[in-house]
Image: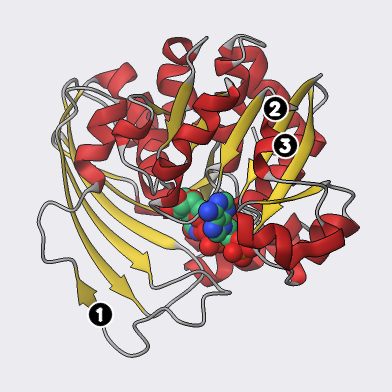
Amino acid sequence: MKRIAVNGFGTIGKRLADAVDAQPDMEVSGVTKTRPNYEADLAVERGYDLYAATEAGLEGLGDMAEGSVEELLVESDLVFDCSPTGIGARNRGLYEDAGIAAVYQGGEPHDVAGFSFNAAVNFDEAVGRDAARVVSCNTTGLCRSLFPLVEAFGVGDVSVTLVRRGGDPKQTDRGPINAIVPSLGIPSHHGPDVAKVIPGLDVHSMAVKVPTTLMHLHAVSLQLESRASRSDVLDVWETAPRVMQVDGGRGIGSTAELCELGRDMLRPRYDLWELALWKDSVTVEGDRLSFFQGVHQESIVVPENIDAARALLEMADSEYSTRTTDDALGVIR
Ligand SMILES: NC(=O)c1ccc[n+]([C@@H]2O[C@H](COP(=O)([O-])OP(=O)(O)OC[C@H]3O[C@@H](n4cnc5c(N)ncnc54)[C@H](OP(=O)(O)O)[C@@H]3O)[C@@H](O)[C@H]2O)c1
């Protein structure tokens, strides 16, 4: 049983703690907070040992805390760094000092681990490494749909427009409230980030931010290098890991209905770990394939993190890890 620490118990951290708890071969050694808020209460209620992420946190958490993050790390085999964007890189020294493996999140730069991870693409290259960075929610979604096409047909240029949620549901300080905000730096960082995982793939990305909190939506258009029909493409995605084909004709025509689907499936926190791909949008014209896909930003990276831990700790091969993760969570195959 491997012992996994979760440093930062926010949007991603609390989901990862619950995902670790659900696995048969790992357990939560502890989670950290910097302050005694409702999430700290939740951690204790769920039975996770709570540690202080910072020195000030140790004082603020008082009796709630079992100790410092340093004390947690020495009792752990691996840490998920789930601290706010940019803090992970600053935490790296802590993990190196403790001599344990670390999995960082997509808000950190590639250099934090020198290796960007997606389970379907490069699990084997992660085996035995000290550190990996699970790419962002948007990049994970793009890797899930694009890599199976690269393998099946070859892919030339890819053009993606990302319609990004303004903030997560709990982020009262994020916006916009009444605007569509283009990211004026073109390409956006997402295309180059995909190439960190799938080297050589030419992805041109542009992004806009809109007043919604539920999900991201991607409009994708790409060149297929060998001839394929619409049904050939759908067949490839049918067996692709963690890809769920959804049907506008059956009433799932928007990100709102996708989230309602998560509620109706009785998913924890209405999480959709799968990439949602609108099959009615899939169109092939000559060698050009176009489609829409939806990304639940708060949860899509959860299965990839669990697989990254198994790879770094040399616990399993890719196939076993993916199956175990998905069965434990209830990911649709
Ligand atoms: N949210 C998403 O949609 C999403 C999707 C994919 C990837 N990511 C990435 O995942 C990472 C975490 O994002 P998030 O959305 O989970 O952020 P979040 O909800 O703000 O959670 C971050 C947590 O880190 C804690 N924290 C603050 N300072 C810390 C420190 N020095 N050391 C350890 N923990 C500290 C905070 O705890 P306190 O409240 O106690 O201060 C907070 O609970 C980022 O790299 C982000 O880019 C986020």
Residue 175 falls left or right of residue 207: right
Q: Amino acid at mark 2?
A: Val
Residue with the mark numbered 2: 74
The disc placed on residue 180 is 1
Whether residue 78 is visible here, answered yes or no, is yes
Which of the two discs, 1 and 2, labels the residue nearer the N terminus? 2
Q: In front here: 204 or 48?
A: 48
The answer to whether the residue labelled 1 contacts the one labelled 2, judged by CB atoms less than 8 Å apart, is: no
Label 1 SS: loop
Q: Is residue 126 left or right of residue 181?
A: right
Q: Quadrant of residue 332?
A: top right
How would you rate the neighbour count of disc 3 (Cα within 10 Å): few for under 14, some for 14-19, many for 20 or more? many
Q: Earlier in the sequence, mark 3 or mark 1?
A: 3
Q: CA distance from mark 1 to mark 2?
A: 46 Å
Label 3 with label 1: CB-CB less than 8 Å:
no
Q: Nearer the viewer, residue 287 or 12?
A: 12
- Residue 297 seen: no
Question: Do the CB atoms of the residues marked 2 and 3 lie less than 8 Å apart?
Answer: yes
SS at badge 2 = helix
Measured along the vertical axis of the image, is residue 29 above or below residue 148? below
